[in-house]
Amino acid sequence: MKKEIFAKNFLLITLVLLLIFAVCPRIVAAAGLFGAPQTVSKEAGGINTAVGYWYHEDTCQNGADHKIRQNMIYSQAAYGAGNIWEIYARLGVSDLKIFDVFSSADPSTATGKDDFEENWKFSGTLGAKIFYPFNETFGMGAFVQGTYYFSNFTDNVSGISGGVPFVADLKVKNLWDVNFGVGLQATLSCGMRLYAGPYLYYSEAKMSLSAAVPGLEYAAGNVSVENKSTAGGFAGADIPLAKGFRLNIEGQYADRFSAGAAISYTY
Amino acid sequence: MKFYIKIIVRLKFQKRRALKFVSRTIPHSGGYNTPKQALGSIPVIVLFIFLTAGYAHSAGVTGGALSASSSGPVELASSSAHVPVQTAADAANPLEEEYKEDEVSDNDTGKAVGEEKAEIADPLEPVNRAMHQFNDKLYFWALKPVAQGYKAVVPEPARISVKNFFSNLGFPARFLSCLLQADFSGAATEAGRFTVNTVWGIGGLLDPSSGKELDLQMQDTDLGQTLGVWGIGQGFYIVWPVLGPSSPRDSVSIAGDYFLYPVSYIDPWYDWLGVRVWQEVNATSLRIGDYESLKNAAVDPYVAFRDAYIQYRLKAVKARKAKMMKSASEEAQSPEREPAVPKKEN
C-alpha cells in the first residue's frame, strides 16, 4: 500500500516539475549524457566513475537563429546507493562552434568568416538522479543536472565595413545550462538497461562583440542568448561489459540531434 | 627517506635476524681504528670503488666465504638459505607467518637463487652513520610532527587518494624499467594500470586497477633493479641525507627516476619542493609509528637498516630475475614455438 502511494506521489511530483519547467520563460542546453535513471553503483553504496564523449547540436536564438555545435569530453565521478539514487560531478572540456554568427546583415560589411569557433574550455557539471523500481524489470526515474563553463569562449572576426577594415572579438560568457527529465527504464536479463523519456532544459550565455560593426549582432554587449527549444526526448542503453565496466550510449533530440557514449567503472 | 619507509615493513619481520647479524657485523663494520682515520681515507675509497669495483661489482651474490677485507663487504644473513621452522610462538604471530611465507616463496624461486649471501661494503660507515643520524632527526623533529598535524586534519581516504595519485605519476619509471628488463607483460600491466587509473580513477586518485576484477598490480620495480637484473652490483652502502639508504647503483636509479617523474618538471623550483614535501608528508602520515617501532627493536638501528635495505634490494632484484626466467621459459614452451604437425585426414 505504502509503495503504491509513494509511486503515485513520485509520478505526480515529476509531472508537476515537468510542467513547471515547461511554462518557465525560455530554456536551453549542452550537457552530456543523462545516463540510465538507475545508478550503477553497488546497492550498499559506492563510487562509480566514467569517461565520456558527447556530440551536441542545438539552436540558439536572439532574434536570429544560430546552430551551435559542441564536442565534449568529460570525466565523471558518482556516488550512489540502494540502487535508487546517485549524485555525480563531471569535469569536461568542450569546444564551441556557432554557425553564421559573423554573417553580416548589412551589405556594406564584409567579414572574413561566418562562424564562431573556439577550442577547449573547461566545464563542470553537477547532477542527481533518483529511481523508483516498479518491479524487477521496469522502473522510473528522474534527474536534474546543470553545467557551467568556467571560462569564456572567444573568437575574432576581421573584415571591411563601409570601406574601413575592422577586427572585432566576440565573447561567449557565462555559458550554463540546466536539465531536468524523467525516464522509464527496462532492465533486460543480460543486465542491459534500456531507457527513454522526455526532458526539459534551459541554457544561456552572454555574448558581446568588442566593436560596433554595422550588420553584426551583439555589439550592444552582454546580450543574452538562449536555446530555441525547451523540451526534448532522450533514449539510451547501458550495457554491461566485463570486469565492472559498462558502456552507456545515448541520443537526445530537442531542436537538433545530439549523441554520445561513456564507459563507466563501478567500484 | 623513501627507502627507509619501504624497508620498515620488512624490518619488522627481520628483527631476530638483525640481532643475529649485528653481532657478526660489528667486528667487520669498522676496520678503522678511529673516525679520523676513516674520514681521511673516505675520498680515496670512494674514488677507488667507483672506478674499479662500484659499477662492475657482481650482483653481490656469492656462494663463497665472506671476504676478509677490513673495509670490505659485510656479510648479511641470507633470506633464502634455510627452511623456516614454525614454532607455536611463530604461529601465533601473523606478521612472522607472513614473513615465513616470503621465505618459502624465496625457496620456490630458489633454483635461480641458490645458496646466497648478500654482501655490502660499507667504507663510508662513519659518514653514513652521521647521515643516518641526520635523517633520524629530520624524521623526528620535522617530518613526523608535520605528518601528525596533517593526519589530524586530512581524513585517511583523502590521504590514500593522494598517495594513489603520486604513485600513478610514477608510471613512466616503472614502465621503462619493465621494458629495459624485457618484462613486456609487466610493462603492459603498468600501461593498463596507468590508463585505467587515470581515466576511471579520476586522474589516479583512485586505484580501480588493483581491485579483484581487474587485478592489475603495480610492478614494484625501478631503474636500480633494472641495473641489478643486468648484473650490476650494489657497490657499497651509502646513506644520502633526506633520501636515505642507497648504493652507487641505486643512486643512479634515484637520478633516473627523478627525470622520469613528472613532478620533477614542476616549475618554479619552490612549487616542485612544495609538492615533494607534501608527497612525503602524506606518505609518512599513513605509516606513523612503523619507523619508531623498528628503531626501538634494533640494537643498532643503523646496522639494522643497512641489513634490511640490502636484503630488500637483493630480494627485489632476485624476484625480477626470477620473473624474467619464468616468462622466458614460458615463451620457450609456448605451442607457437613447437613445429606444427599436420592433421591426419581420415
Image (spheres, rainbow, N blue to C red):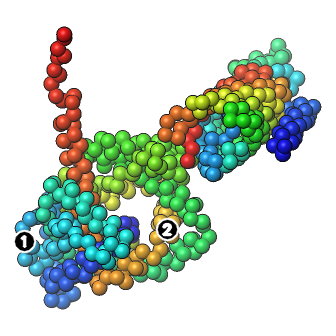
Q: Position of residue A251 (x, y in %)?
A: 68, 25
Question: Which quarter of the picture shows residue B335?
Answer: top left
State the separation of the CA atoms marked 1 and 2. 41 Å
Q: Quadrant of the N terminus of chain B?
A: bottom left
Residue drawn where x is 68% and y is 35% of the image: A136
Question: Residue most toward the front?
Answer: A1
**In this view, B105 is above or below B134:** above
Q: Amino acid at mark 1?
A: Ala
Q: Position of residue B234 (x, y in %)?
A: 21, 63
Residue drawn where x is 88% and y is 37% of the image: A12
Question: Which quarter of the picture shows residue A128?
Answer: top right
Q: Which residue is mark 2?
A: B286
Q: Front-most of B226 and B126?
A: B226
**In this view, B322 is above or below A201:** below
Q: Chain of mark 2?
A: B
Q: Which residue is mark 1?
A: B65
Question: Can residue A131 be seen by looking at this rendering?
Answer: yes
Q: Quadrant of the C terminus of chain B?
A: top left
Asked which secondary structure carries label 2, the reply is loop
Q: Position of residue B56 (x, y in %)?
A: 14, 59
**In this view, A47 is above or below B127:** above
